[in-house]
Amino acid sequence: MFVQVACTLDEEEIMQRRYHGLIIGSLSIAVGLILSAYTEWNKEKNLLNYISWDVNTVTSADYTVKFLITKEFWEKFKEKKGKEDHYMTMS
């Protein structure tokens, strides 16, 4: 035998359940927004820390280019540009 009974709640209990649902939903959204804001703030803080570290650890090697030149090129360069620059040497 199967008996189905309709679930009836009085108006006060329905309003109480709606109120609890509203509170739980609102708190969930607030926690999500706070977590999102904290994650974004932490990402920006780490980016600034990285930029600060990068600026503090800059070396001349960051701006140095190394390439090979021939002896002929060096001699021509000295003839044209190097006449007034006596400190130029090839190493």
Image (spheres, rainbow, N blue to C red):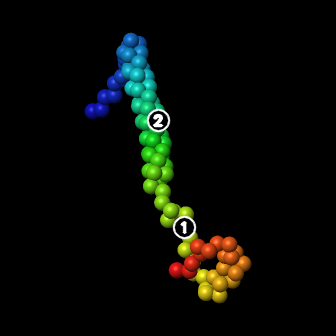
Task: Give the residue type at disc 1.
Answer: Thr
Q: Residues within 10 Å of mark 2 (few under 14, many from 20)?
A: few
Residue 55 is situated, as x and y percent measured from the top left of the image, at 49, 51
Which numbered dot is residue 64?
1
Confirm whether residue 43 shows in the render.
Answer: no
The residue closer to the viewer here, 7 or 55, is 55
Q: Which residue is mark 2?
A: 37
Question: Counting residues from the N terminus, which is met first, the one under dot 2 or under dot 1?
Answer: 2
Q: CA distance from mark 2 to mark 1?
A: 41 Å
Residue 72 is situated, as x and y percent measured from the top left of the image, at 65, 87
| Quadrant of residue 81 within the rendered picture | bottom right
Which numbered dot is residue 88?
none
Give the mark count: 2
| Quadrant of residue 31 within the rendered picture | top left
Q: Is residue 9 above or below residue 69?
A: above
- Secondary structure of residue under mark 2: helix
Q: Residue at x 50, y 62 (%)?
A: 60
